[in-house]
Amino acid sequence: MQKQKAILFDATMCVGCGSCYEACKEQNKLAETNDDFLKDHLSANTYTVVEEYGDVYTRKMCMHCVDPTCVSVCPVGAMEKTELGPVIYDPDKCLGCRYCMQACPHKIPRYEWNKTNPRVRKCVMCYDRVSKGLQTACAEACPSGATIYGDRDEMIAEAKRRIAEDPDTYYPEVYGLKEAGGTSVLVLSPVPFDQLGFPGLPNEALPNYTMRALEKIPTVVSVGSVFLGGMYWLTKRKNEIAKENKMSNKKESDNNENN
Amino acid sequence: MKTINLPKLTFWRAVASIIVITGLYSTYLRFTGGLQSATNLSDTFPWGLWIGFDILCGVGLAAGGFTLCAVTHIFNIEKFKPLTRPAILTAFLGYLLVVFGLMFDLGKPYNIWHALIMWNPRSVMFEVAWCVMLYTSVLFLEFLPMALEKFKWARLLSIVRKVSIPIMVLGVLLSTLHQSSLGSLFLILPTKMSPIWYSPFLPVYFFLSAVGIGFAMVIFESFMSARAFNRELEMELLSLVGLISVSVFMLGFVLKLVDLITSGNISLLFSINEKSLLYFLEVLIGVFIPFGLLIQKSIRQNKKWLYVATVLMVAGFILNRMNVSITSIISEAGVSYFPSVNEISITLMLVVLGMWAFRLITKFFPVFQPMSVKH
């Protein structure tokens, strides 16, 4: 099995130059959406943005969850978690139910609302590039080293090393280590993550919330069919007996009358 | 010589026709310009009125089909038999409308068959899709005797009758699964919904409210058809159905109350805001007022009051499902959404089409009384 890859984004190193934004647009052949990349937001034509929070810059993009919610909810398996880590999308399978958008805890997938043949759009961690052994376009373009790409376990070790070496600079957590079961995009920040617009999430992977209900289905079906079948047999028998009693009562009373 | 009678132009017919014409124009916009040109849906609010009403309420309002089948054919309580066929027809039409309505909401409706061959058993949506597909087929088989009696196809009729019990058991099982699974659809949104409505017990609440509203809809249908066909109402039976219906809603309310207390989320109801007010409204019109009315024997046996209580239960049920799917998400995400004129007009068109189809079929098929067919 190949090693899972990951992106490590370090907000303390980001200078807000927008190189990742431009590289992403170019790599994915996306239309221009805003003259000022800092004012842009995620859309069907923008897979990553740079956001300004005071003097801190952060990036937003698909987090490529370890156990992705979008993959679990898609009724036709149009979303796929690849062995390498990227979560990719197959528009030919998609029905357009948008359950992935509704369910994504990071509020990432975007839709082509104006098209009659619409697709879900989001960062796919440059799957074409990384499956050839290259790094993502954004990591390659980043001049300050704020976005780097590599094996997930190495990225985690690197993130922890940075926090340990410079505890004054960093908020002492790695976002993506545990959030919703963990992600393949890891974030370091000088401030708590909610101040950079990252949602607070349970540590459990969200698909588990659904599985707890789905795993009861076999019980409902087996107990249910026995119960319903039994009730049918019982109540039918009861009605028959009631009918027979009526008949015999009637016979008896007829006999009595005759006598 | 035969003269053709044009239907008389009444007020409701005129309204219904205008609704359908507007709906057709909205349909044109939807399929030529994409979802953007017809809806107020957005990246931050991808599920709106069509999911909240057409699907979640549509499937629930059609639940009378399985509850009545269970009561009359599985529990063999024969006195409810006169109500079963209209309930099956409503359910059959309801599910056809749900599937038809889904075509408007899906971005790529022509790919709907993919659920048949591209499986993802971890997805609640996948399970719902299969259940709805199978149950619609079951409803077709349950409706079939009415058509076969009409056309006097005795041999086929006797075959269908022979398999009717397993078919009905299957129908009840499938309904139990997908009625509750509509609630399970929202289990994966623990961080995106208001805790007033989010609960691990959503599937239980959805199932109970479906059972309750299924019974209530039977009363509603009886009133509709009594008016349309000048039939007498079976008040003895209907008042009992009303009592069952409101008791199920009360049970659902009590379970949810216990749930809110044990989870501590009950405190959210102590502050007055849009969310808590909408919750109070939901239980007031859907549970408390109908319960207060129908618990009294003289009132539930009164035609007018029974009708009022039923309409309230239907309204409360609809509000509940809209609250789960819209209110609770809007308030947590801080987004705004109100359905567009086109979303509303297409939804209204579906309702009118359903009513027309019900009228038409009850006119030509033996829905209210079985016909005897000689072998």
Image (tube, helix red, strand yellow):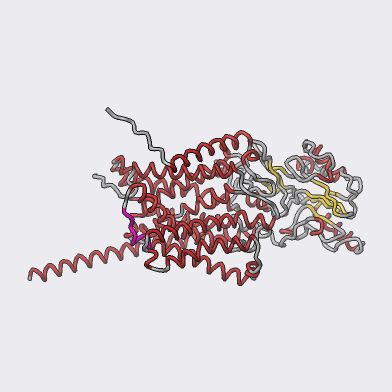
Q: Would residue B163 appear left or right of B112 to someone viewing this image?
A: left
Residue A33: image location, x then y, percent: 79, 39
Horizontal arrangement in the rendering, residue B342 relative to residue B336 (left or right)? left
Q: Is residue B208 left or right of residue B359?
A: right
Image point (50%, 66%), residue name: B288
Task: Say if residue A207 shows up in the picture.
Answer: yes
Which of the two residues, B145 or B158, is positioned nearer the viewer here?
Answer: B145
Q: Which residues are magenta?
A: B232-239
Q: Is residue A180 above or below residue B109?
A: below
Type of secondary structure dominating the magenta stretch:
helix
Whole-percent x and y of residue B127? 55, 51
Q: Residue at x 30, y 49 (%)?
A: B370
Horizontal and vertical percent position of residue B308: 44, 59
Q: In the image, residue A38 lies at what x, y percent?
A: 84, 46
Q: Which of A236/A110 is in front? A: A110
Q: Residue at x 53, y 43 (%)?
A: B101
Residue at 51% across, 56% down = B315
Magenta-colored stretch includes residue B233: yes
Of B292 and A4, the residue lying toward us: B292
Q: Quadrant of residue A243?
A: bottom left
- The total of numbered circles placed on residues is 0
The reply to whether residue B76 is visible in this rendering is no
Report the quarter where the C terminus of chain A lies. bottom left
